[in-house]
């Protein structure tokens, strides 16, 4: 597969603009992070429901769409609170000044979403059960997984010779995102130059060479180069952790990409949306993240 330089240039330009927006959302504050992924949540739900309508050749009632979205928003906000109570870290949300906001807004959204879902369900003349259940799966695919990402936005502590080092709150989400970005970019470049063996019928452009090369380079970059360039003294003890997170993100991220490719193929569309030329929609940009996050979250909760 030869390198298409025109496509690569377009993707690079818009990719850098996208990276700047993402960096601002990640690095500025928790509120900018929450705003960024609230926008992703809105855009993701809009595209996901469109795919479901195309797949099952049906139309979902507007009230039902709004109901699913509001329920999803309530779940997205509640997941970090529930997780923090289970792990006794809710003091972090009090520190950010978020606890009351999350709880109060959550109940309002929960009530509104439940009412709209009931109205939308009973207004449907004929309920397409498979489409209905598939749409409801968006609560898990989008809302729970973004909620888990919000839960990872908190400091971790690394033991050092001087005592301990507290990481920035964005450290874990940013590590996951960078792992996926390096994996995707390197898989595309390696696959373009030496890719010959198709990886999956779902995504014909993916090759085994690109997939393996992308994963290896992602692990090397995040697990070895990243701590060598940043927080060198503090991250010496985190090499195994970073290598594990990069490995999980590479494998799970590729699975997330294939899952969304399968949905698009079933819907008969090339892209889930038109957010950016050369990059597609919200789901096209965050499909890998949506599957990688819960896998990394489980690792973090079990071992960190």
Image: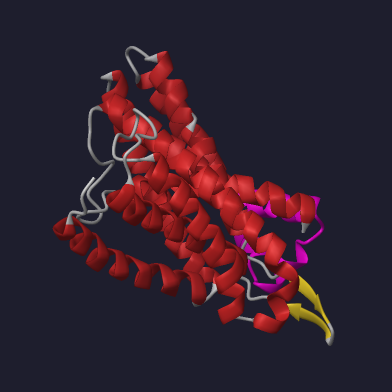
Compared across the picture, whether 224 is left or right of 61 comes to right
Q: Main secondary structure of the magenta part?
A: helix
**155 over 230 or under it: above or below:** above
Q: Residue at x 52, y 50 (%)?
A: 250
Placement of 286 over or under 130, stated as above or below: below
Q: Is residue 90 magenta?
A: yes
Q: Position of residue 54 (x, y in %)?
A: 26, 26
Q: The C terminus appears in which quarter of the rendering?
A: bottom right
Residue lying at the far top in this picture: please name it. Answer: 126
* Pick the front one: 252 or 196: 196
Q: Is residue 211 magenta?
A: no
Q: Which of 167/192 is in front?
A: 192
Q: Quadrant of residue 208?
A: top left
Position of 30 with respect to 182 (left or right) is: right
User: Residue shown at 45%/36% (left/top)?
Assistant: 68
Q: The N terminus lies in which quarter of the figure?
A: top left
Question: 118 or 7, which is in the foreground?
Answer: 7
Observer-nearest residue: 145 or 250? Answer: 250
Q: With 68 as the anchor, is 86 left or right in this view?
A: right
| Residue located 30% across and 33% down the image | 264
Measured from the top left, where is residue 285 in percent x and y? 36, 52
Q: Which residues are magenta?
A: 78-103
Q: Residue at x 29, y 70 (%)?
A: 17
């Amino acid at each position: 597969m030869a390198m298409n330089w025109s496509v690569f240039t377009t993707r690079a330009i818009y990719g850098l603009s996208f990276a700047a927006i993402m960096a601002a959302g990640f690095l500025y504050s928790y509120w900018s992070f929450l705003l960024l992924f609230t926008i992703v949540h809105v855009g993701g739900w809009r595209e996901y429901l469109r795919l479901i309508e195309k797949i099952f050749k049906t139309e979902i009632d507007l009230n039902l769409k709004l109901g699913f979205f509001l329920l999803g928003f309530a779940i997205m906000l509640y997941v970090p609170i529930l997780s923090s109570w289970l792990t006794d870290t809710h003091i972090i949300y009090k520190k950010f000044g978020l606890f009351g906001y999350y709880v109060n807004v959550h109940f309002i959204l929960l009530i509104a979403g439940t009412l709209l879902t009931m109205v939308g369900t009973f207004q449907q003349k004929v309920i397409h059960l498979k489409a209905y259940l598939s749409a409801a799966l968006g609560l898990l695919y989008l809302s729970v997984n973004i909620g888990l990402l919000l839960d990872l936005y908190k400091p971790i502590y690394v033991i050092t010779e001087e005592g301990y080092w507290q990481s920035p709150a964005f450290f874990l989400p940013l590590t996951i995102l960078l792992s996926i970005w390096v994996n995707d970019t390197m898989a595309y470049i390696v696959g373009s130059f030496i890719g010959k063996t198709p990886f999956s019928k779902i995504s014909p452009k993916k090759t085994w060479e690109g997939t393996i090369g992308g994963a290896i380079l992602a692990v090397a970059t995040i697990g070895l180069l990243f701590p060598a360039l940043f927080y060198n003294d503090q991250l010496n003890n985190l090499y195994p952790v970073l290598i594990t997170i990069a490995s999980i993100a590479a494998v799970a991220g590729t699975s997330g990409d294939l899952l969304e490719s399968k949905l698009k193929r079933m819907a008969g569309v090339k892209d889930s949306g038109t957010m950016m030329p050369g990059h597609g929609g919200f789901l096209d940009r965050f499909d890998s993240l949506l599957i990688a996050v819960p896998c990394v979250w489980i690792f973090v909760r079990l071992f960190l």
